[in-house]
Image (cartoon, rainbow, N blue to C red):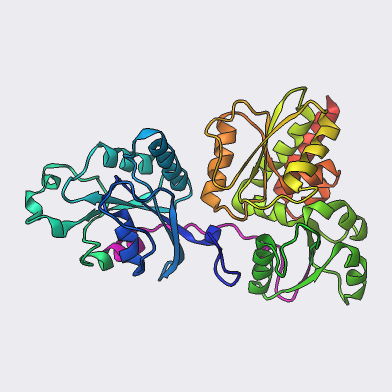
Amino acid sequence: MIENMNSTPLASRFTIGIFGRRNAGKSSMINAITAQKIAVTSEVAGTTTDPVYKAMELLPIGPVVFIDTAGVDDTGDVGELRVEKTYEVMRMCDFAIVVVDAQIGITTFEENLFKELKDRGIACICVVNKVDKVDKLENTNLTKQKLPDSVPVVYASAETGKGIDEVKRQIIANAKIDAAPPLISDLIKTGDIVVLVIPIDKAAPKGRLILPQQQVIRDILDSNASAVLTKENELKKTLESLNTPPAIVVTDSQVFQEVSANVTEDIPLTSFSILFARQKGNLTEMVRGAKAIERLGPNDRVLIVEGCTHHRQEDDIGTVKIPRWIRQIAGDDIKFEWVSGVSYPQKLDQFSLVVHCGGCMLNRREMQYRIAQAREYGVPITNYGVLIAYIKGILGRALTPFPEAKRVFEEDFIKQNNK
C-alpha cells in the first residue's frame, strides 16, 4: 500500500471491508463499486489471496478505503492463513459488505459473518450478487431463508452493474461515522504558534516528513494557527527568534530530554507519539502501562509492536533503543519479541508488557482492538512516546496539556512513593 503524500492517509479514511465465501464475487464487487479493475477476478475459487485496498471519495461520507478479502470458506493450511488475514481486516473496519452468491444463498459461513459483525458492533449490508445468473430470484433458496434482521439487502450484479448504485446508497445511508478525537486542535486557538521539533537523522525519510508530523501540521493549519518547524539543535535559536512564546512545543520522542532542557516550564511540551496515543487509543491506559516497566522481572517478555514496516536503521528505535532503555531499568534478562504491520498476537498471556508505536498507520478501531486485547489478558500496554518520557523522567511534564492523564500519573506516583 503506497500512499501519496497529498492524499488522505488510509488510517484516516472510513474503512469498508468486503467479505463472503470464495467466488461470491467480492473482487468483482469492489471493481464495480470503484468503477476500476482493482482486484483480479476469476471463476476459480480463491483468486484473492491477500487483502486488496482501494481508496476513493464516496460523498457525502468523504475519503473511504474499500478492502477486498479472501473467502471465509478457504481451506487447507494456506487457506487458513488467508482466512486469518480476512479477520485481521475485519478488526479495522468501520463498515462491512457481505457478498452472497445468488446461486448458493446464505450458508453457515454468511450466518457466522453476520454474527461476528454484530458482536463487533460493525454496521453492514448484505449484497446478493450474480442475480443475472438466476432465471427468477424467487426460485433461489434465498426466499426460503430468513435474511438477517435489520441488515439492508441489495440484489445486484457486479457483472452487469445492476444494483451497484443502490449498494453505494445503502453504504451512505447506514454508515455510522464517529468523529475521532483531535490531534492538537483542542489545545490551541486561532493565531497561536506551535513549534514542532523534528530531528533529521539517518532514519528520517529522504525529501519528506513522516506521517505523524504531516498530520499534526495539517491539524494546526485547520485551526488557523501557525506551525514553526525546527531541528533539536536549532530549537533554542528558534524560540529566541519568536516575538511571543509558542502555545505548545511538540517534539519527536527520541529527543525529548534535549528539547525539555531548552523549553521553559511555562511552555507546554509534549510529543507526536503522545498526541497519537490520545487520538487513536487511551492515553491514561498508556500512562499506567509505562509504569509497569518498574515491575518487570528476570525473563519477563516484552512485546514491541509497530503498525508499519520499514527498513531497520542502525540504533533503530523499536529494535535497539527501547530494549536498551528498558534493560537499563529492568535488567538484562528481559526478553523481547517484535511484530509489525497488521500482525498482532491473538493471545498475549505470555507477555508482561506491550510497547506500541504511535499507531499513525493504524486506524482508531484497530488501535482500540489492540488495547482491548491487552486489557483482556491483563497485560499493561504503553506506547513509544509515553514510555520514553517516563524513562527520561519527564512524563509528568509531557502530560501537562492533558489534565486527566496527568492526574492518573500523579496519583499512581504518590501511591507508589507512599508504600
Q: Residue at x 31, y 54 (%)?
A: 26
Residue 3: horizontal and vertical position, in percent? 56, 64
Outermost residue toward the top? 298
**280 horizontally vs 197: left or right:** left
Q: Residue at x 41, y 37 (%)?
A: 78
Residue 286: horizontal and vertical position, in percent? 68, 42
Q: Nearer the viewer, residue 403 or 235?
A: 235
The image quadrant of residue 250 is: bottom right
- Tell me if residue 46 is in the magenta stretch: no
Q: How many marks?
A: 0
The image quadrant of residue 214 is: bottom right
Would residue 400 be visible to someone looking at this image? Answer: no
Residue 186: horizontal and vertical position, in percent? 66, 63
**257 horizontally vs 15: left or right:** right
Decide: is 141 above or below 239.
above
Would residue 108 be visible to someone looking at this image? Answer: yes
**215 horizontally vs 92: left or right:** right
- First to last magenta residue range: 167-195
Q: Quadrant of the C terminus?
A: top right
Q: Nearer the viewer, residue 78 or 285?
A: 78
Residue 12: horizontal and vertical position, in percent? 54, 61
Q: Nearer the viewer, residue 263 or 34?
A: 34
Q: Residue at x 55, y 52 (%)?
A: 364
- Tell me if residue 189 is in the magenta stretch: yes
The image quadrant of residue 171 is: bottom left
**2 horizontally vs 144: left or right:** right
